[in-house]
Image: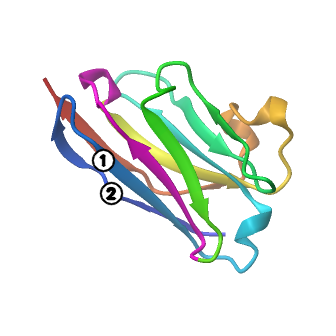
């Protein structure tokens, strides 16, 4: 599975941005999709995930209420709608996919088998 992330850019604090993750697979609906991010000098951290069936969602506390993860299985695409962006949201955002995760593993980056190339989000104050 190849993942192509897009939608990053330079925005001001309080702005919104939507990231997209296009997957090259005919079995997209079988994959749990997630977004992680890595800020300069920091470790990669979990942002959000959406499960393959039923579409239940999970969020990091730092983005809950501001970010929304969704998926369109017909388009093989996952999205991350980001609102009220803050300077601390500045990072490279990566999408990830895996077909075999249980709920307890959703927030763990090394549990995901497939990764996109990352898209940079910069939020100015």
What residue is shown with label 1?
Answer: 17
- Sequence-first disc among 1 and 2: 2
Few, some or many residues within 10 Å of mark 1 (<14, 14–19, 20+)? some
> Which quarter of the picture shows residue 42?
top left
**Considering the numbered disc 1 on the image, is that residue within a helix, a strand or a loop?**
strand
Q: Position of residue 65 (x, y in %)?
A: 48, 27
Q: Position of residue 103 (x, y in %)?
A: 82, 35
119 versus 125 height, above or below: below
Which color scheme is applied?
A: rainbow
Q: Which mark is residue 45?
A: none
Residue 66 is left or right of residue 44, and the answer is: left
**Considering the numbered disc 2 on the image, is that residue within a helix, a strand or a loop?**
loop
> Which quarter of the picture shows residue 89?
top left
Q: Which residues are magenta?
A: 75-89
Residue for point 34% across, 37% down: 83
Q: Is residue 83 magenta?
A: yes
Report the quarter where the N terminus lies: bottom right
Pick the residue in front: 53 or 43: 53
What residue is shown with label 2?
Answer: 7
For the image shown, how many numbered marks are present on the structure?
Answer: 2
Residue for point 80% across, 64% down: 30
């Amino acid at each position: 599975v190849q993942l192509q992330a897009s939608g990053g850019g330079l925005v001001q604090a309080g702005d919104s941005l939507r990231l997209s993750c296009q997957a090259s697979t005919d079995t997209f609906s079988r994959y749990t999709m997630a977004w992680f991010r890595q800020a300069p000098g920091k470790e990669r951290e979990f942002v959000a995930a959406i499960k393959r069936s039923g579409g239940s969602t999970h969020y990091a506390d730092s983005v809950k209420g501001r970010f929304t993860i969704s998926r369109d299985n017909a388009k093989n695409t996952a999205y991350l709608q980001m609102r009220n962006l803050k300077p601390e949201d500045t990072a490279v955002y990566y999408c990830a996919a895996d077909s075999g995760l249980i709920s307890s593993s959703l927030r763990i980056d090394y549990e995901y088998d497939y990764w996109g190339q990352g898209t940079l989000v910069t939020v100015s104050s």
